[in-house]
Image: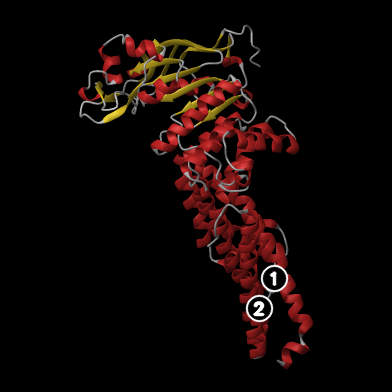
Amino acid sequence: MFNRKTATSSMISFESVTKTYPGPSRSAADVVAVRDTSFTVDTGTITVLAGSSGCGKTTLLRMVNRMVAPTSGRVLINGDDIAHMNPVQLRRKIGYVMQHAGLLPHKTVAENIAVVPRLNGASRTEAKRSVDRMLDMVELPADMADRYPAELSGGQAQRVGVARALADEPRILLMDEPFGAVDPLVRTGLQQQLVDIQHELGTTMLFVTHDMSEALRLGHQIILLAEQGRIMQQDSPTKLVEQPANAFVEDFLGLNAVDKTLRTRTTEDGRTMIVDAHGRPAGFLEQA
Amino acid sequence: MNWVTNNLETIISALGWHVALSVPAIVAALLCSIPLGWLAHRLPRYSGPIITGSGLLFAIPSLPLLIVLPVLTGAGMRDGSNVVIALTLYGIALLVRSVADGFNSISSETRLAATALGYSGFRRFLTVELPLAAPIILTGLRVVTASTIALCTVGAVLGIPSLGTLFTDGFQRQILAEIMTGIILTLGLAGICDALLVVLGKLLMPWQKQVA
């Protein structure tokens, strides 16, 4: 599964996918979650699907591991239509991280991390090796292996969630607002760790968030979605900020908000300080 | 006390019969209730009829049931299988709701995670859903165990041996010690079985901080 054809090919392609759900009653119209959306995710990069709640970003994410089947259109992985793949086998090859980690409460940290390697037929010894390696990668102490999820903090649980998703070295990692429920300080640490891990493993990642600063921090490519999965702009973070395609993008970036405008001020020792609209320091400017 | 020491063999035989009739009934009730409760959980539209329907089994009066069952099964009136079947039905009546509650208690997030990880249907049932439903099922099973051990004595009226035989015999022959022995052993057996279930629960469900 997923033979890499060329090093720079697109890993995941969405071809005019549409997803409708039956309306709340028989006479009600169908509810459209995603309408005719197409985009590609390049191999070995992080693509962020950003947008407000209800824009269809989670629906799109779940199409990749067949948790959601498109009503029409196709999703391809390395050129192969996943509709023809066994969904259970497909999911075992794709990492998935969810908002509240979604750890299995009756399994220890080690057992949770070992789930996918074991499902894929790894022996206990092999799985144990994966567990040790993953705990080390997400910087959790080895003695945490025997704890149960209920005994972890939110940030620790999410690290285990990432470790579990990556334990069998999937080529693709799907993340659904994974850091939304952890406090801001921990979140920044987890984001940095994810960037490092992605750099090290070269995993292709599709990341869903409604937090634009998170999108800008993580994404090689950002796809900003309006309702029904309508793509408002698809660009690198720099391009998105420098050349927002329309008012929607500007609003979502908060570029028009008064308190986002930054000014510079020279301090007494001659350095240039950046201050926000309220005069509060945001940092120092370093001359390139 | 004299009566006890003189009749140890009778007492042990009655206790043996009691265990031999109630334990299979408890196990059978559990095995029947798991699919029924799971169906009630999977088919919300039918969960009312399944749970209420099985609960109504408990309303069947026990003596008439014990008289009708041999006619249906063809077994002899004094055959122990009648008691096992009757007790199983009563156990199912009490347990189906607990099983459904147990499966319903699993968070949708956990189910979603199990699917996303790549569990196949049956493996997910056996290694994720059943263990997570188990604490609530165990609570129901403890009630069923106590109830089954108490109800098992009814068979004595029809001459099916159990600890109940010690009461019927004791009443007829006006031996208080025999009646007391029957009551104390029934309570003791129920208590020991309950304690065993609690210990078993702690061993099998270490993720549970405490099994109430």
Q: Which residue corresponds to mark 2?
A: B185
The foreground one among B56 and B63 is B56
Where's residue B152, x and y in %? 63, 69
Q: Is residue B68 visible?
A: no
Tell which subunit mark 2 falls on.
B
Label 1 chain ID: B
| Residue that carries the numbered disc 1 in the rendered image | B18
Residue A139 is situated, as x and y percent measured from the top left of the image, at 57, 37
Q: What residue type is labelled 2?
A: Leu
Front: mark 1 or 2: 2
In the image as oriented, which residue stretches furthest toward the bottom? B2
Q: In this rendering, would B168 be left or right of A235?
A: right
Task: Note whether A52 is above or below A76 in the view shown.
Answer: below
Question: What is the quadrant of residue A134 in the picture?
Answer: top right
Give the residue type that dot 1 points to: His
Residue B133 or B46: which is nearer the viewer? B133
Query: Residue A266 is drawn in which quadrant?
Result: top left
Tag on residue B204?
none
Relative height, residue B2 to residue A8 (above, below):
below
What residue appears at the point 59 percent right and 48 percent down from the top-left corner? A147
Q: Where is residue A182 in the image (x, y as percent from the top left)?
A: 42, 38
> Do the CB atoms of the residues marked 1 and 2 lie less than 8 Å apart?
yes
The quadrant in which the N terminus of chain A is found is top right
Q: What element carries label 1?
A: helix
B110, above or below B12, in the image: above
